[in-house]
Image (spheres, rainbow, N blue to C red):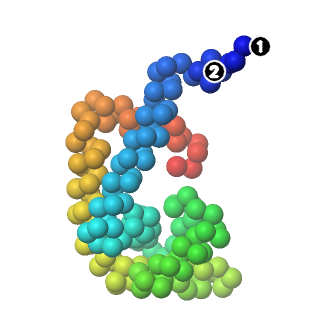
Amino acid sequence: MAIVTLRAMSVFDDTEMAAWSGFLRAHKVVISKLDAELQHAHDLPLVWYDALVQLHMSGRPLRMKELAGRLLLSRSATTRFVDRLESAGLVTRSLADDDRRGMTVELTEEGYRRLREASPTHLDGVKAHFVSRLGRDELETLASAWKTVLTNEGG
């Protein structure tokens, strides 16, 4: 009986596999560096920074369900996550005006201050670890590819 290797079983050619595994590795490396920089400089995990950005960009309080969708978390994970942000004084939770059963989340002044302080570190990191390593054509190709991949996916 012949032993079938993973490569032989693969439905991907070398280019497809390189694109997929490269995406996964690049994501891990860049996200790890960005998280470490924010933690070191501002004692702020990247996932917390992302939540503050999402709340700020919304321009209004977000329902827990909306925030969960923007952060790609389940509702229960979002509840626990918002508990930690609220304990840190970065957000407040309140009953939704239009539906007293729902909860909304919004930035506090402290949350906004921390976001303002951390943004230069994060943006410099994105530039250093991602944008500056690619040429304009590569950036345009990636932007187009992500748009194609995310079409009809809610992303």
Residue 94 position in % (x across, y down):
55, 86
Residue at the spot of label 2: 5
For label 1, the SS is loop
Q: Nearer the viewer, residue 141 or 96?
A: 141
Residue found at x 22% / y 42%? 132
Residue found at x 24% / y 33%? 135
Specify few, some or many for label 2: CA neighbours under 10 Å numbering under 14, 14-19, or 20 or more.
Answer: few
**153 up-or-down from 16: above or below:** below
Residue found at x 53% / y 67%? 67
Quadrant in the rendering for residue 112: bottom left
Residue 151 position in % (x across, y down):
54, 40
Mark 1 touching mark 2, by CB under 8 A?
no
**What label does residue 1 carry, if any?**
1
Residue found at x 49% / y 19%? 14
Q: Residue furthest top?
A: 1
For label 2, the SS is loop
Residue 87 position in % (x across, y down):
48, 85
**101 up-or-down from 71: above or below:** below
Quadrant in the rendering for residue 97: bottom right
Q: Residue furthest right?
A: 1
Cα distance in 3D space between marks 1 and 2: 13 Å
Q: Amino acid at mark 1?
A: Met
Q: Amino acid at mark 2?
A: Thr
Residue 116 position in % (x across, y down):
27, 72
Q: Is residue 77 left or right of residue 115?
A: right
Would you say residue 75 is visible in this rendering?
A: yes
